[in-house]
Structures are given as C-alpha cells and as structure tokens.
Image (tube, helix red, strand yellow):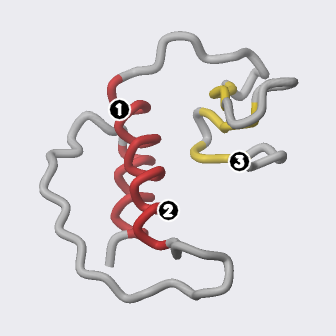
C-alpha cells in the first residue's frame, strides 16, 4: 500500500484512491485525474510495476535476491524522460 503520492515523471504521479484500498489513480501535474493514458504512459507504469516485483522479496523478513532478468520488449512508445528512467533502472 502506498498512502503517499509517488512521483513517476514530470508528467504524472500515482496515489492511492481515496476510500478505496489497493486502487490507485494517475494524477497529472495540474492535480486532475488522468482518464486516457497514452500507450507510453501505460507501458512505463507496467514496467515500473514489473521492476518492483523483480526487485522485491517474497516476505518482509528476507532481503532482495539477485536475479537474471531478460527484457525483450521495444519501449519506443515511451517519451525520452521515461526511456531515461528505464535505462537508469536497468543495469
């Protein structure tokens, strides 16, 4: 659960929806709720979700494990800011 606002890029952030646990909404910089996400925004959010699943551990007691992950997917629909973030996350 993320009770705080998570800033993803200068273009949007994610926050937990009020009074709806485990449901999140994408918020634009002007504070409006994003209704129609671009393909690049959807891909970027999906990548971040995948990234955190891979980096995490199965229980709170154990730490992250080293893993080999192969990413074979053209990320060209992402804008330059998102591509930069993805490239810095992937070693």
* Residue assigned mark 1: 40
Instruction: Please say if the residues under marks 2 and 3 sit with CB atoms less than 8 Å apart.
Output: no
Dot 3, crowdedness within 10 Å: few (<14), some or many (≥20)? Answer: some
Front-most of residues 57 and 77? 57
Task: Residue 36: give x, y in percent of width and height.
Answer: 49, 11
Dot 1, crowdedness within 10 Å: few (<14), some or many (≥20)? Answer: some
* Residue assigned mark 2: 52
At 67% from the left edge and 85% from the top edge, which residue is drawn? 61
Q: Quadrant of the C terminus?
A: bottom left
At 78% from the left edge and 25% from the top edge, which residue is drawn? 20
Q: Regarding mark 2 in the picture, which secondary structure is present there?
A: helix
Q: Regarding mark 1 in the picture, which secondary structure is present there?
A: helix
Residue 85 against residue 32 in the figure, above or below:
below
Front-most of residues 59 and 81? 59
Mark 2 and mark 3 lie on one chain; the one further toward the N terminus is: 3
Q: Residue furthest top?
A: 35
- From the viewer's perspective, is the residue at label 2 or at label 1 nearer? 2
Is residue 73 shown left or right of residue 65?
left
- From the viewer's perspective, is the residue at label 2 or at label 3 nearer? 2
Q: CA distance from mark 2 to mark 1?
A: 18 Å
Is residue 61 shown left or right of residue 65?
right
Mark 2 and mark 1 lie on one chain; the one further toward the N terminus is: 1
Q: Regarding mark 3 in the picture, which secondary structure is present there?
A: strand
Q: CA distance from mark 2 to mark 3?
A: 13 Å
Mark 1 and mark 3 lie on one chain; the one further toward the N terminus is: 3
Task: Residue 10: give x, y in percent of width and height.
Answer: 61, 41
Q: Which disc is residue 6 wearing?
A: 3
């Amino acid at each position: 659960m993320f009770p705080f606002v998570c800033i993803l890029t200068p273009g949007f952030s994610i926050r937990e929806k009020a009074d709806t646990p485990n449901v999140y909404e994408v918020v634009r910089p002007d504070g409006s709720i994003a209704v129609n996400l671009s393909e690049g925004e959807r891909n970027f959010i999906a990548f971040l979700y995948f990234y955190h699943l891979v980096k995490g551990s199965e229980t709170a007691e154990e730490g992250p494990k080293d893993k080999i992950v192969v990413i074979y997917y053209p990320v060209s629909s992402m804008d330059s800011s998102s591509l930069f973030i993805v490239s810095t996350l992937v070693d």
